[in-house]
Image (cartoon, helix red, strand yellow):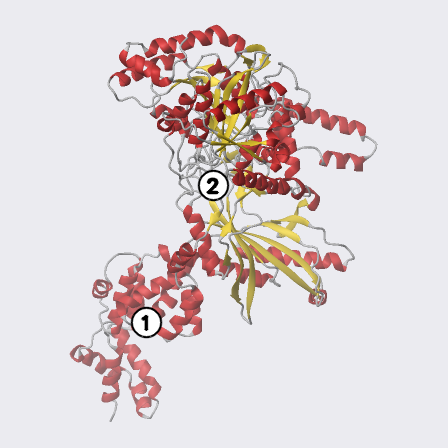
Amino acid sequence: MSTIAHERFEAVIGLEVHAQLLTKSKAFAPVAAQYGEAPNTQVSPLCLGHPGTLPVINENLVRYIIKMGLATDCSVAPKSIFARKNYFYPDLPKGYQISQFDTPICFDGFIDIELDEYDKRIGITRIHMEEDAGKSIHDQDPYNTLVDLNRAGTPLIEIVSEPDLRTPQEAYAYLTKIKQIVQYLEICDGNMEEGSLRCDANVSVRPRGREKFGTRTELKNMNSFRNVEKAIEFEIYRQIELIEEGGEVVQQTRLWDTTKNQTRVMRSKEEAHDYRYFPEPDLPPVIVTEELLADIKEELPELADVRQKRFMEEYAMSENDAVTLTESRYLADYFEEVVSFTKSPKSASNMVLSEVLRVLNEQSIDIGEFSVTPERLAELVKLKEEDKINSSAMQDIFNAMLGNKKSPEELAKEMNLIQVSDSGFLEPIVDEIIANNPDEVQRYKEGKKQLMGFFVGQAMKASRGKANPKLVTEMVSKKLQN
Amino acid sequence: MSTNSIAEIREQILNENLSLKDIVTDYIATIEDQDSEINAFVSTYFEEALSEAEKIEKKIKNGTAGSLAGAVLGIKDLICERGRQATCASEILGDFESVYDATVIERLKAEDAILIGRTNMDEFAMGSANQFSRYGAVKNPVDTSKVSGGSSGGSAAAVASNMVSASLGSDTGGSIRQPAAFCGVVGVKPTYGRVSRWGLIAFASSFDCIGPFANNVEDAARVLQAISGFDEKDNTSANIPVQNYTEELKQPNRNIRIGVPEEYFGEGLDSEISSNINETLKKLESEGAELVPISLPHTKYGIATYYILATAEASSNLARFDGIRYGHRAEKSSVVEELKEEEGRLREEFKDDQVQLDLALSKMDSALIKLYKKSRTEGFGTEVKRRIMLGTYVLSSGYYDAYYAKAQKVRRLIQEDFKKAFEKVDVIAGPTTPTTAFDQGAKLDDPVQMYLNDIYTTSANLAGICGISVPSGSHSNGLPIGIQFLADSFQESKILNAGRLVELLDK
């Protein structure tokens, strides 16, 4: 594959993202939607497709999707209907999925994405509600496929983008943004590896400058953001190569094979299902009143973009720092809570950006699982602000805090790190350093003032980190003045 | 056998030392005596009925009994009762038992009704003669050479032959009113949304209504009263207060305006039925009613519209009967066998052409698809298959607009017809059926003739309004004739009132 050929073509990408909602109960049945429970225990007669059962709309499903619609500048339909999508599969107990077809509740919105070199607005065609299917398990019994219906009927929203994306990197940035939004709204945990976010991609290529879209393929089975990026990349190259060789792209659904890092055919257009959509007669139309809309708007949290700007203004933060801190709602919440206890945003952001993020990375955990509460971190920041400890001690105490519940001050005392600002204690130490290092003293006196760092370092070492560096500096410069 | 009303029976238990257990025993004796011929019941629960009778009798005596104490009911085999079979008279459900009570069952039990058994029906409520049942046809108690009507034939026949005091059926296109007319009993199709469908095995969700059969309007009203009302388990049930049906019946209103649609007395209507209904209406007029000629211009599209929309919904509703989780599943070995045979046949046919062979083999059904096809082929009867295919067809891409979408538009026109009519009249009257009960076995080969039997009943289901059929004397062939009254949504009191007026004419 030559890069030159690649440059002659442009890819057109649209994404369909499914987000599993964090409602307590299922979409249409009053039964818990818990994950990780024993198979077929989170079920009601409705989830089992028993005859005579009827779906009842979970009000929170409507509230959650409207939040998503508002967060992506969508119009919200005052009246929309559910539709049945009919197909047979063992993990689809009713033989149809309740979804929305020609009247999605949210439509015509957009999401702004940021890439290294440019920002871009991606159109949202529609967002609609539907229920999930169960799980077919093919690898636990040599002779039978097993079906777990715990997931059957859990609420999903499907977010369909316009074909506005042009590169795998844009697709990645778009997904990251969706994840950020659903997390900010607290409607989905955004975990793609565990399947609470799922993504299908429609990909086609066309010669640059041409208006008309090429024939598209639909990519499925990509279970991480990176895989989406890789699969799209592979598919773009595959299509360009095919066209370059005089072939034609065939409309089909292709699966991403994670082990082989390539896409392969799942089914062709001819084999596509006729889902026979029709209005769901068991559910009345979803009516969204002005009052409901106003009520939900009231509930909307501050979203990342707005929060980022506020951080820059309110805490005099660099754009980079603000972006990092607001990337996850929970990290931003954590930071603001630390600030509320300290009134020292600068030290708080330094601590969170350097130390806290380092630990999260090392331990591969989310801020929610982080062992140090904002209040304890704030106490540590305060110790430093009050000059009770120095920066190196701060780092040591922070590390010590990870493993226990003691207060930072207690730890500082235990570790003997409370800064000594007592000249009576420091005087002999400083004198000894001056006595032991005549060469450095000589050079300092000759004007090599940078050697101050050396003397302070020696003092820190001799005091085992407890010396107040400011005081040591004062003392040394005074003693070496003449 | 007593044909006293439920209220009278209760009175007798309280004041004349009549025993409810004896009454139940009498019903059991009638069932045992007659049902081998009539075939109204598909399963019975005599022991439970007798022990319930003892408990309820005590409640009657100590004044804590519900409004249906003294009533013994049969339940159509598509309304779920916990721990009892629910087969819709279909092989596909095998020996399925429901794990929960339908809302109507909870309400009947709360009012101390005794539920004695499950009544026969057309498979999945699809039919107008109760001839499509895995348990065999139901015979008309008035003349056993005739059909009972359907699809709630068992529920109608059980009441007509005094095997129960009342019963529940379901009406999707006339399945309560038509058998009620054929068997000479009262049958009520309530307004869509009046009675919860939770626990009613769906045929066509936007049409299906549960309603009562009884020997008189008062009992029908009493049962209807018990089962009506909002239910949060059914999003299509209406949160509108229920009228006091039984109370309002005590002082029937004779000065009502009755709309008489010309379209209900046209071609195809038996002339004797026509004159019978006109005579009944004349009598009502002489007692104070006003007869208003009206027109329901879209009536002629009713049957076609109904059979498109109802079958479309049915094709989806019946998808869950796939042999995977419950009910009938084809033998695994026979599925494997068939696949092997098919493969063998293809290998023989294309033995000289590897390319054709590979193509043919790749198009073979997977074992799963084969299992679905075989289970459903074995489990569903002819009429059900016909309607599933019809419904699948009208929803298919490329046909949806021509059939389903268009039928939905016509449905709205039919609703408009009624809306306009009810601005002028309290009720609309006409014959329930174009003919009296026909011979067993007739029309079996001619589905369209069979569907035409629903000509006067389907409109009410399309419009969602309520209707009642009450006996209006007999035909010269000895069979009962039913008169139908329709009223606007949630105006059940009006049809019950009109039915009561007809009852009073005989006295």
Q: Quadrant of residue B435?
A: top right
Q: Residue at x 48, y 48 (%)?
A: A286
The quarter of the rendered structure image containing the N terminus of chain B is top left
Instruction: Count numbered badges in the picture.
Output: 2
Depth check: give the residue in front, A259 or A315: A315
In the image, A331: left or right of A471?
right
| Residue matched to label 1 | A345
Which amino acid type is marked by label 2? Arg
Tag 2 residue: A151
Badge 1: few (under 14), some or many (20 or more) residues near its Cα, within 10 Å?
A: many
Q: Position of residue A37 (x, y in %)?
A: 41, 39
Task: Please report the residue visible at 60 percent of the width from the left and 29 percent of the height from the top.
Answer: B264
Residue A195 visible in the shown view: no
Mark 1 touching mark 2, by CB under 8 A?
no
Q: Where is the C terminus of chain B found, in terms of image quarters?
A: top left
> Can residue B286 be seen in the rendering of this structure?
yes
Residue nearest the observer in this picture, A191 or A477: A191
Rendering quarter of residue B71: top left
Q: Residue A204, how many percent across, how many down? A: 67, 57
The relative height of residue A243 versus residue B406 in the rendered view (above or below) is: below
Marks 1, 2: nearer the viewer? 2
Asked if badge 1 and badge 2 are on a common chain, one would say yes
Name which quarter of the figure residue B23 lies in: top left
Residue appearing at x 64%, y 22% in the figure: B334
Mark found first going from the N terminus, 1 or 2:
2
Front one among A113 and B351: A113
